Image: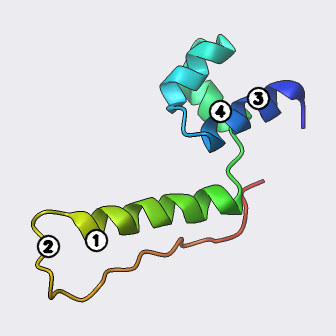
Amino acid sequence: MSAGHTYCTDLARSGVPLVTASRLMGHSSVELTAKIYTHVDQSMTLGAAAQLNAFYRTAADTPTDAPETVITPRNPNPIP
């Protein structure tokens, strides 16, 4: 992986929004950043699922006696 790919992937891992990463990379479009430079790995996929689970657990409109909703990634394998 090149330095640019590593830099952009590390921005994504640290939670930097894609639009911001695209601007930091000097790209003309967010699509370029998303398609070519950002590599999603298993830890990022699982982290996103964990964030969504936390959101569902703390949602104000969810009754406290409701069963827990657990979201799992459809493809837990890293995206090359």
The picture places residue 44, in percent across and down from the top left corner, at 62, 55
**Badges 3 and 4: C-beta atoms under 8 Å apart?**
yes
Chain-order first, disc 2 or disc 4: 4
Which residue is identified by label 2? 62
Number of the label disc, if any, that sits on residue 11:
4
Which residue is identified by label 1? 57
The picture places residue 73, in percent across and down from the top left corner, at 53, 71
**Badges 1 and 4: C-beta atoms under 8 Å apart?**
no
Which residue is identified by label 3? 7
**Badges 2 and 4: C-beta atoms under 8 Å apart?**
no
SS label for mark 2 = loop
The picture places residue 35, in percent across and down from the top left corner, at 65, 36
**Badges 1 and 3: C-beta atoms under 8 Å apart?**
no
- Which amino acid, by three-letter code, is at mark 1? Arg
Left or right, 74 with reference to 44: left
**Badges 2 and 1: C-beta atoms under 8 Å apart?**
yes
Report the Cα–Cα distance between label 2 and label 4. 33 Å
Number of the label disc, if any, that sits on residue 26:
none
